[in-house]
Image (tube, helix red, strand yellow):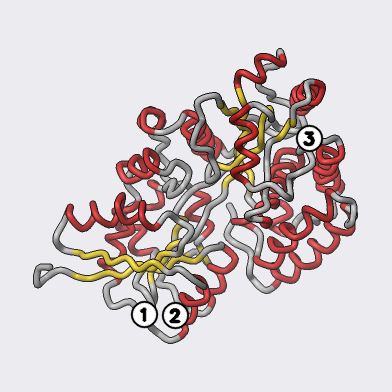
């Protein structure tokens, strides 16, 4: 290390591919210039708690990762993150990054971080199976129902999915039906506090999800099978399709194709993709090397970096760039990922995007949604009781200022 080189420390949790992150970003960054040395520390246990404790103690890493937008607001409220607005202006992040990604980390008009990735959901399907069923990829609720009915007649599971290894991921289904049935405008209204979650359009949305379980669309093992086991059924053709997230893709996509998940009412714009994110990244307010840390973040927001991640770990570290870069992503990644990533970017640009619960709901409300999916579809909690409890919890958190930023 040269005498003028500045060290920047970044703490990374187990989830976001630490080995790949080191090889695809840290190493190229360090070898590509000699002014800043980026040191990566991988936390293997209690990542969030250890990071928050370090921040509370006035130390911790220079670059901070917080797993959820609601938690991020809490860290900002305690004064632990640096105002990045001057750096955003200097580097032009506002025009280079997707607008909702920037707004998620904006508090009182000031930017305190950026999401490390953009995530969305799509309809993944086994193309030969749909052809054998005589069905085209569905683009509406009636067409989706026709594919499901055809699959059941042939002894196939309509949706190959599971959540046993990550029970909280059941909230993906809640996000999906609420956005694609109620629509982005209704969800945005609820997040703003202008429309109660108890509104009939949300009741009908959740009732659709319950009906899909009742009709056997998920088979009998959704809560017992892992995410990988569920996807494997689509790959081997014992399931026709699956509502999937870009962060969870099977290794073998050779028989698979993807379309936007259908809008479930004519009033909902199509095609439409839900926008969500994983961890948010900021700079420690106590860092003595903030300028160098900002330079690291700016280097992350580069399409060549996203291309490297996409080629190796499609769906993880999908940097939320406004540039779709569709041709390049298609050349280096599975088509099912490239199509969904490009579709999300276009949906955001056109204002046709939904809101992921794991990014836009405050912590307690999100936890309630994740915890209620199973009792809802098993009939142990009624839809109206669920939404009444959600409205109560959400209203309390919103009044406390814990709702992530919206357009």
Q: Secondary structure at mark 2?
A: helix
The residue that appears at 77% across and 67% down in the rendered structure is 393
Question: Which quarter of the figure has residue 399?
Answer: bottom right
Task: Compare residues 288 and 317 and report the one nearer the observer.
Answer: 317
Q: Position of residue 302 (x, y in %)?
A: 32, 46
**Residue that badge 1 annotates:** 286
**Residue that badge 3 annotates:** 217
Q: Secondary structure at mark 1?
A: loop
Q: Is residue 75 visible?
A: yes
Q: Is residue 111 visible?
A: no
User: Is residue 150 found left or right of 74 in the rendered image?
Assistant: right
Task: Compare residues 57 and 378 and report the one nearer the observer.
Answer: 378
The residue that appears at 68% across and 45% down in the rendered structure is 162
Q: CA distance from mark 2 to mark 1?
A: 8 Å
The residue that appears at 60% across and 66% down in the rendered structure is 70
Q: Position of residue 196 (x, y in %)?
A: 80, 56
Q: Is residue 49 above or below residue 124?
A: below
User: Crowding near pointer 1: few (<14 within 10 Å), some, many (20+)?
Assistant: some
Q: CA distance from mark 1 to mark 3?
A: 51 Å
Q: Is residue 256 above or below residue 95?
A: above
Q: Is residue 138 above or below residue 318?
A: above
Q: Position of residue 27 (x, y in %)?
A: 24, 55
Q: Which mark is residue 351?
A: none
Q: Earlier in the sequence, mark 1 or mark 3?
A: 3
User: Crowding near pointer 3: few (<14 within 10 Å), some, many (20+)?
Assistant: many
How many numbered marks, from 0 up?
3
Mark 2 near mark 1, Cβ–Cβ under 8 Å? yes
**Residue that badge 2 annotates:** 55
């Amino acid at each position: 290390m040269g005498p003028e080189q500045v060290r920047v420390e970044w703490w990374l949790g187990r989830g976001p591919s630490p080995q790949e992150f080191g090889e695809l970003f840290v190493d190229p960054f360090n070898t590509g210039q000699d002014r800043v040395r980026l040191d990566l520390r991988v936390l293997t246990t209690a990542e969030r708690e250890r990071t928050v404790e370090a921040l509370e103690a006035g130390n911790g890493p220079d670059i901070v990762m917080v797993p959820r937008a609601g938690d991020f607001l809490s860290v900002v409220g305690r004064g632990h993150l640096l105002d990045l607005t001057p750096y955003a202006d200097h580097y032009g992040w506002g025009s280079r990054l997707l607008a909702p990604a920037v707004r998620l980390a904006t508090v009182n008009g000031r930017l305190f971080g950026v999401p490390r990735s953009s995530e969305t959901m799509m309809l993944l399907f086994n193309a030969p199976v749909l052809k054998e069923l005589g069905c085209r990829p569905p683009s509406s609720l009636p067409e989706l129902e026709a594919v499901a009915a055809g699959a059941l007649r042939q002894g196939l599971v309509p949706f190959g999915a599971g959540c046993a290894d990550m029970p909280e991921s059941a909230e993906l289904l809640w996000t999906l039906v609420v956005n694609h049935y109620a629509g982005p405008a209704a969800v945005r209204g609820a997040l703003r506090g202008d429309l109660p979650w108890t509104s009939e359009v949300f009741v009908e949305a959740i009732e659709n999800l319950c009906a899909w379980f009742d009709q056997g669309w998920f088979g009998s093992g959704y809560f017992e099978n892992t995410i990988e086991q569920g996807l494997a059924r689509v790959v081997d053709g014992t399931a026709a399709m699956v509502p999937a997230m870009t962060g969870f893709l099977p290794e073998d996509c050779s028989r698979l194709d993807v379309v936007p998940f259908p809008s479930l009412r004519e009033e909902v714009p199509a095609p439409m993709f839900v926008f969500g994110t994983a961890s948010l990244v900021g700079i420690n307010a106590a860092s003595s090397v903030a300028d160098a840390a900002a330079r690291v973040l700016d280097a992350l927001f580069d399409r060549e970096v996203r291309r490297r991640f996409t080629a190796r770990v499609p769906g993880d570290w999908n940097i939320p760039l406004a540039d779709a870069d569709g041709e390049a992503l298609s050349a280096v990644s599975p088509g099912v990922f490239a199509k969904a990533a490009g579709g999300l970017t276009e949906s955001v640009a056109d204002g046709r995007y939904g809101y992921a619960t794991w990014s836009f709901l405050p912590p307690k409300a999100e936890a309630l949604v994740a915890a209620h999916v199973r009792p809802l579809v098993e009939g142990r909690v009624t839809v109206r009781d669920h939404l009444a409890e959600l409205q109560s919890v959400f209203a309390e958190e919103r009044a406390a200022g814990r709702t992530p930023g919206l357009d």
